Amino acid sequence: MSVRKLTSGYATVMILLSAGILLAPGWHPVLWPALGMMSAGGIFFGIRRYRPKRAAAWWSLAGAVVMLAAGDTTYAILPGSIVTELCYLTVFALTAVGLFMLTRGNRMLGDRSRLLDVLTFLCTAALLAWIFIIGPYITAPGMDPFERSILAAYALGDLLILAVMIRLLATNPRTPALVLLLVGGAGMLTGDILYGLTTLGEQWQPGGPIELGWLLTYLTWGAAGLHPSMAQLSEPVEIEPGKISRPWAVLLVLATMISPSILLIEAMTGRIRDGAMLAITSAVVFALVLSRFGDVLAAHRQTVRREQGLRDACAALVSAADAAQVDRAVRSGLARIVPEGVDHRLVLVLNRTGGVPALASSVWGPSVPVTATGTLLPSTAAVRRTRLLRRPTLTPMLAHQLGSFPFALLCPLVLPEQRPPGPVPAQLRPDVTGPRAGVLLVSAETGVLNALRDAIEVLASHATMALERIRLGDEINRRDAEVYFRALVQNSVDIILIVDDGDAVRYASPAVQTVLGRPAPDGGPLTDLVDPPDHGRVLEGLALVRSSGEPHDWPDWRLRHADGSTVQVEVSCRDLRSDRAVRGLVLTLRDVTERRRLEQELTHRAFHDSLTGLANRVLFHDRVQQAVARAQRGGHAVGVLFIDLDDFKVVNDTMGHQAGDELLVAVANRLAATLGSADATARLGGDEFAALVDDATDPAEVEQTAQRVVAAFAEPFRLAGRMVGGAVSVGVATTSDAEGTDELLRHADLALYVAKGAGKGRWRRYQPALHVSLIRRMELRTALERSAPESDFAVVYQPVVELASGNAVGLEALLRWRHPSLGLLRPDQFIDVAEETGLIEPIGDWVLGRALAGATQWRAALPVGEAPYVSINVSARQFRVAGFTGKVRRELIAAGLPADSVMLELTESLLLQNDDQIWSDLAQLRELGVRLAIDDFGTGFSSLSYLRQLPIDVLKIDRSFTAEMAFSQRQRSLVDGIIRLAHSLGLQVVAEGIETVADRNLLGDLGCGFGQGYLFSRPLDEADAAAWLAGGRPVGLTHP
């Protein structure tokens, strides 16, 4: 009998039985069992005929029908008995279990959304049941506790069945069997509700229309068992989280309106009975619905993220240049496709097909370990379509890589045009023929794989196209490379030779003619091209390559050019005798003749000074190191001389850099001639030279060498028709005071420093005591940096007098430093340190302001026209600071002093610098009215023509001339010449350091108008200077 006929007969019988129940209540004890047996029989038939995977669920539903029929039968015989109640309660349990088992066959991606739906409708139904049935029953008079318990059990059973039905509706496809089950369940719930309402109103009568709901349950559940779609309810169905249809959303919104609606109705009737229950239920339902729509939004974001991930992965695959980049793009794309927090594994296997390299890599969540390549797929997995593979069908290696998931999705990497066109169901997709680039395997929960199958297939198809594009590009590049390299060999400047086992040249590229100026040898021996001295070395090298089979490179072979010259080449040799296309040794020869010449030149420049040709600092250090090592082995002494030109900066500034370079070359030549060898000398930089004294018998021999050097440079040089002094200072160090090279060089540098401090044209040998001097200088520098001009410095004044009358015409401002431990220090004890550190600028500015302030005080105390000028020393560094002239102008204005009451004393070296800015500043000061003086005239390297060009008012003769003038005719003649020169130029002369009457008288006789020194007065502080000037008496011979 066909299923259709059987169903028709079943429906006919069930309708007749239902009519009998409605029309003949007296026959209920017979009709109810018959009706139940027919419904259960339909379910039994479906279980045997269609064999669903979850048969237990249907058996449970069949039992529920049987127990429902039993309850109805006993109720018809003994209404209200305990047996009847137990039968009905069993119906609730069996129905809920059966329906729930059917829902368990469905795997939902995140069951939270469906649970929220169930809870929403369940809360609403519970509210309605409480208000219309449970509440009235509980409060009804005359009910004992047993009846209330039974009533509560019935209500809970109905609510439980309602919850499972909602879950079943939300998670299963709309098949006929499902619709019949839901209609039957709805009939049961409707019958229960109507029964409760009529019972509450004492209107219940057996056989009435209320029993239609229960009759519908019998009819539809048996029909559901007979329908073939009943087996589909046991098949797994994948449902993504958060998805919601429009009708379902409307139902959820309506559920939220039930509680407020009931509350509104009760308020309108004037009696609110269930306000608390309505408020609580309304809040809970609203919270559940909001959470549900939050899941919808999250699902939408996940969908957007998945689509964006696919777009980004496809974009990355379009730009991928090799298989590794394809692998990274696929891994990145899958991580974006899979929902966040969902565990998964990925293995990408690429075949070596058409030039695509083999690759197998896996993704373990966030980490990326890589498997070994090999036969990864068993024969049963060699499919040409996407399918789910069970874990046991995979090789152990793949099973390990894919984790413990029971299934893996396999996507063959096949070009899209190789797939069948049009949408084809998965079960009917034929295998695709043609080569594969590989496979993509993804393992995760089965629901995840099914839900993401389409997205993973899209990703795999784009990966396939990227690999095919790479393969085609490689093929095109390979073919182009063949043409390219053929043209390259023919036009290469490198010589390419193929040599047979007899060392004969079987092939030579055209570059032989270009490099060697001769035609390519045709079968001649290779040695015809090689320089005769290299024949043996070349033949030995070729024999080594043949015996080892390994490639060899030689940096220098010498070939013979057609004109007889030698050509240096780099050689690379490869043994390709096993290659049928070559069958010989392949030699590539590159002409490096010019490169070797340049390398030699660069090497020479790296270790020699480009101007003088002497060794530079690096080479000199190496030579000293070698000499020290020999001295330690041989027991002799080694000395190092550091040599510095004393007046090189003056020459450079006054005569120009070209003259300075000429002087350096002349110094290098004279130094080499003095020492007898250029190899022993070096230029360390600037005007600093060095000399190595090797094999000295003792330190005295090194000192003699230093004396010879100083004596040799005492003779001036002739540059551009002028005589230029070339005095040098020399620092000497020997291995007797040093243990190593670095210490020896440091000692020489320190000795040079001391020699320059001692004066020009001197040499000094290193002594351990020099360290003490250096440490003291460092301490002096540290203390100077910590000092403040306002508290740690003082300005004293020494009168400048007119020698003829003894009247004071000026006061020179002198700086003193109150050192915390050394006491009061004069400028010559610390001023050079201040120059080095740059502290001379703030100190000099303070002295300028302090001296002008003092001059203002004594000018205010003296009659107009009798106040002396103030003379202030200005260092070269202070003068070169931008804006110095403007600073002097501002200080004069602030002090209220006329400019002609100030004299600035400048060093001779500053005035002789050929600097336009210095000359401009001097002119501005002169226009301002400030007087200018050259301090310590005659002690520096001077050009007398500058005295005529510079805006100078006064020359000050250094104390070194006046101190010995009374005892030396030569010194007296020098002073006389300076005074005459100054008078001829219209300059005043001030002599420094006058300490005796004889010196004063002698200077007066020579025509010197002014002087200063201890004969007249020691330096005075500001108060004593003001008092001394206020005394108004001329300074006589007896002044202390």
Image: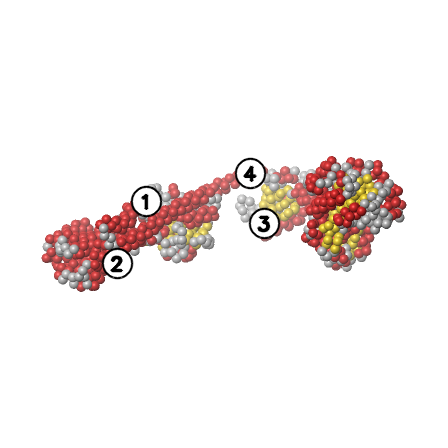
Calculate the distance from the C-alpha at mark 1 to the C-alpha at mark 3.
Answer: 58 Å
In the rendered view, does 182 fall on the left or right side of 893? left
Amino acid of disc 2? Val
3 or 2: tag closer to the N-terminus:
2
Q: Which numbered disc covers residue 487?
A: 4
Q: Quadrant of residue 560?
A: top right
Amino acid of disc 1? Val
Q: Which residue is mark 2?
A: 97
Calculate the distance from the C-alpha at mark 1 to the C-alpha at mark 2.
Answer: 38 Å
Q: Which residue is mark 1?
A: 424
Residue 72 appears in view: yes
User: Of the residues tagged 1 and 3, which is closer to the observer?
Assistant: 1
Number of other residues with Cα within 10 Å of mark 1, as a class: few under 14, some 14 to 19, many 20 or more: few
Calculate the distance from the C-alpha at mark 3 to the C-alpha at mark 2.
Answer: 80 Å
User: Of the residues tagged 1 and 4, which is closer to the observer?
Assistant: 1
4 or 2: tag closer to the N-terminus:
2
Amino acid of disc 4? Ala
